[in-house]
Image: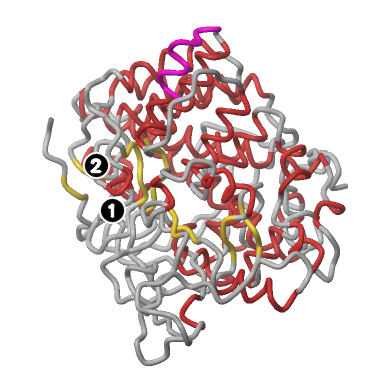
Amino acid sequence: MKNKHYIVSSKGVFAVLLSLVLFTSCEKDFLEDSLHSDTSVDFLYSTAEGLESAVVGLYSLNRNIYQDQSLNGTYPLILQAKSDLGVGITGEVSLYSRLLWGASLGDYGTTSGINAHWVHYYRLADRTNAIIKSAENLTDIGQDRRDQILAEAKTMRAHAFFSLYRLFNNIYITTEPTTPENAFDVPQDKSSPEEIFALLRSDLDFAIQHLDYTPEQFGRWGQGAARHLRAKVAMWENDWAEAAAQTDAVINSGYHSLVPTEQVFAGSLDNSESLFTVNFMKETIGGGSPHIMSWNVVAGYSDAPGMIQSVENGGAGAGFMSLNQYVIDLLNEDPDDNRKNGTYYVFEYAYNDPTALPPGKELGDPLDLYENHPTDQNEFMLYYRRQNPGVLKFFDENVEPTDRNHFKNIMIYRLAETYLIGAEAHMMLNNTTKALEYLNQVRERANTDPVNTIDLQAVLDERARELAFEGQRWFTLKRTGKLYEFLLDHMNNDNMNESYPEGNPKELLREYMKNWPIPQQQMDLLGPNYPQNEGYN
């Protein structure tokens, strides 16, 4: 296996390539390019070296939404907030859990965070289009070099358009980059699913053919990630055979393997389970700026007597959002499940301040001052803010425990999900033996007993335990037609739902909310007959 190393930002690479943003600025400055180095646009798109620099810029651009600290770092956590596994406690991110934000055209959460996702992925798609078009037309370049550039750009384009489709449904796709000639051409209608999925398949099939399993630099797309993404696309098309073939290929490749749970989210994430990450470590691919995702999803335990912020307890936490009782109960079904023992999640915060220990408590004892009371709002709010189990998947163990700014890489795709996709695909093909094999590989790695039967509920339960807060749950439930049902059953927690002054979100929830609203500022820039998603007109 090749030695991997991080991509180091070099002089001459755009910080974000260009400031061109699709449909986000007024017409007079729509085409203005703000260069962040001495590199010229002509160099970027007319030479092999320039195109390679532009590809590196894609990774920097892709990480922007994760490092955006608007609204206390809410943007990268909106999917988690809107899933059935989180409980919104306080802060901006909780407003998405409560359906006060992001559930209508007029609310601020739509014009801010929902709009940020639309802009982010269309900006990414536009930059990939420019790179692909230029690489296809460039004559002074070797074929292998061209194919590498195209493969990475096409995978990123597929990632962008696939994300847009799953979020917004009524999207348009284009393979043409924005130019002065077409900048003010506006889409008049959405693209059909057939058009969208044809492009996704074409881009990813090309990438699979031309990407190595072991990219030269950690953080780039590799063949394993492209196959994983291809399997996810196939699952949306109910193409179980394609999904099974792609997951089998990754699992049997010899390049990727599951690692012990304590290693999955440790360090830089550069392990055999990682398929694709967004890098934040200093002096890596686009690195340098922090995120505050961990701060949002770890309880503010240090507000309790006898507690100070520590690495062992998960560092700094505000407790704005965390695991709800549904996923906590799933993880507690097997007392030996090691995902809750400070690896993926923190279920107990240990007393660690000898100067302020409550009576009868000793150092190392678990914090247990509060009760998740069914009706006493003061009591359950203290519990949620200070004691509720938290998420460690974004925690940077190398920063000061009092620092909310982390440089932890963010896992986007990993092999455990490949196994669970494969389990579902093989189950749908009536290959129960293989489906159970894949499901039990994930379970046994977590020190839980294997099961001998499988159905969709078993797969979804295991996905909840394994992948909670990794941004996949909402998509999976939408794909399987379970989103509305599962949200009605266990979104947030009942006592918290009843405490929200604007009303219980289970009563506000509507099935059409499975598609996000296209923000009005985007609708105003599209054709007059462009269709808004049903329910938001």
- Left or right side of 89 for 40: left
Query: Which one is nearer the viewer's eye here, 354 or 77?
Result: 354
Query: Which one is nearer the viewer's eye here, 402 or 386?
Result: 386
- Disc 2 crowd, CA 10 A, few/some/many (<14, 14-19, 20+): some
Q: Is residue 43 visible?
A: no
Query: Which one is nearer the viewer's eye here, 387 or 411?
Result: 387
Indicate whether residue 432 is drawn in magenta. Answer: yes
Q: Which residue is mark 2?
A: 271
Quarter residue 207 falls in: top left
Residue under the point 46% across and 18% down: 436
- Left or right side of 416 for 428: right
- Region rendered in magenta: 430-439
Q: Which mark, residue 266?
A: 1
Question: Amino acid type of disc 2?
Answer: Asn
The secondary element bearing badge 2 is classed as loop
Please, what is the dominant secondary structure of the magenta stretch? helix
Q: Is residue 353 above or below residue 53?
A: below
- Furthest residue in direction top, as rendered: 430
Residue under the point 47% across and 27% down: 420
- Left or right side of 93 for 297: left
Question: x and y percent of residue 447 in the render?
Answer: 37, 38
Quarter residue 351 falls in: bottom left
Q: Is residue 23 visible?
A: yes
Residue under the point 61% across and 16% down: 238
- Between the residue at mark 1 and the residue at mark 2, the CA separation in whole angstroms equals 9 Å
